[in-house]
Amino acid sequence: MSTAARRHSHAGPAVAGVLAAALVLAVIAACTSGTSDRAASRPPLQGVYEATIARVLPSVVEITAGNATGSGVVFDRKGDIVTNAHVVGTAKKFKVRVSAASHPMNARLVGVFTPDDLAVIRVSHGASVLKPVRWADSAKAQVGAIVLAMGSPYGLTDSVTQGIVSATGRTVTGPNIPGHPPTIIVNAIQTSAPINPGNSGGALVLLSGYVLGIPTLNARDPELGGPALGIGFAIPANTAVEIGRQLIRTGKVTKSDRASLQIKGETHVNSASKPAGVTVVAARPGGAAADAGIRAGDVIVGIAGRPTLLIAALEDALIGYRPGERVKVEVLRDGNPRQFTVKLGSLTS
């Protein structure tokens, strides 16, 4: 074998080793590049969604009240949970689950305020695992803001839908609660995020991780009678916080921004079986109506010239007023028309 041939023979393995090492480095570089490319191609908004859901979802619980289920939001570290009044219904005891994998916790009713469709319940043990949410200033809600609705629709714990704030400042009639006047939600937040049965009482969340409102109901399609897709409503966070604090403190609401005649009333039906006003069943002593001279047995037929043939119409007529304002109230007493000037009080429990 020639010297040249021997040199070529000895050089072969060395060159092969260099080529193999180069190939390994190339593969590693390709893998690293692929990972980098995938990270680079991941939309930044996706990361924000994932972080928001991971932060807030553990603070949204499933509530079982008898045979019904709904959702709730952890209010504080004492185990208080805010939800809808129509979720708790007439129940006094509840089961609460933080996630599908968690054990249910026992809870009891703290207080209910049906006019705003809000309630607070409190777990009897395990409060240390509950993480309170952070509340947004709902007065600053912006139309077009991206929001996530979190809750347990149809019993599917830890569910999330997305949408935007479609409108603010809506006044909508809420769910009927047996034995109570109609629920009217003031300054409701309208959203396109789907709100399904069981979402009620959950959280409408901004991408900042702050809770903007409590999802409560869908609009109804007047022709089909079913829910109108993409039109849902939430109780604003500021209302939920104010009412929640009062319920936790005293078990009832002693002051609200809603105006009231401070009466107990029911729709009056005339001899033709048609609604004809609101009969005053009782006027709270020292309350707005009583101080103005309105008494039990009177039939309220108008507020500032606006007919109030149904109790729902009376509640709706008062929405445009604030506590402390004065308003003319038209009344029938023993069939005779009377008019009273009432300094409106605050709607309370």
Image (tube, helix red, strand yellow):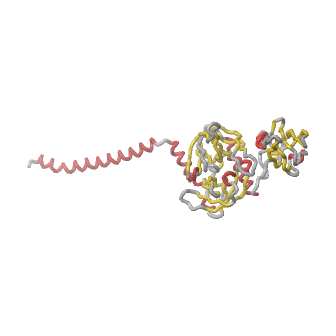
Of residues 287 and 300, the one nearer the viewer is: 300
Q: Position of residue 240 (x, y in %)?
A: 69, 49
Q: In terms of depth relative to the viewer, which is nearer, 14 or 122?
A: 122
Q: Is residue 78 visible?
A: no
Q: Is residue 296 left or right of residue 155?
A: right
Asked where in the image residue 91 lies, by quadrant, the reply is bottom right
Q: Residue at x 87, y 45 (%)?
A: 298
Residue at point 55% right, 50% down? Answer: 159
Q: Position of residue 164 (x, y in %)?
A: 60, 40
Residue 66: quadrant of the picture = bottom right
Residue lying at the far bottom of the rendered structure: 125
Q: Determine if residue 80 is in view.
A: yes
Give the image location of residue 127, x and y in percent: 63, 61
The residue lying at 9 percent from left, 47 percent from top is 2
How many numbered circles does the render carry?
0
Q: Residue furthest front?
A: 272
299 horizontally vs 93: left or right: right
- Please, which residue is most extreme toward the left here? 1
Residue 114 sits above or below residue 95 on the image: above
Q: Observer-nearest residue: 249 or 27?
A: 249
The image position of residue 30, as x and y in percent, is 35, 45
Residue 195 occupies quadrant: top right
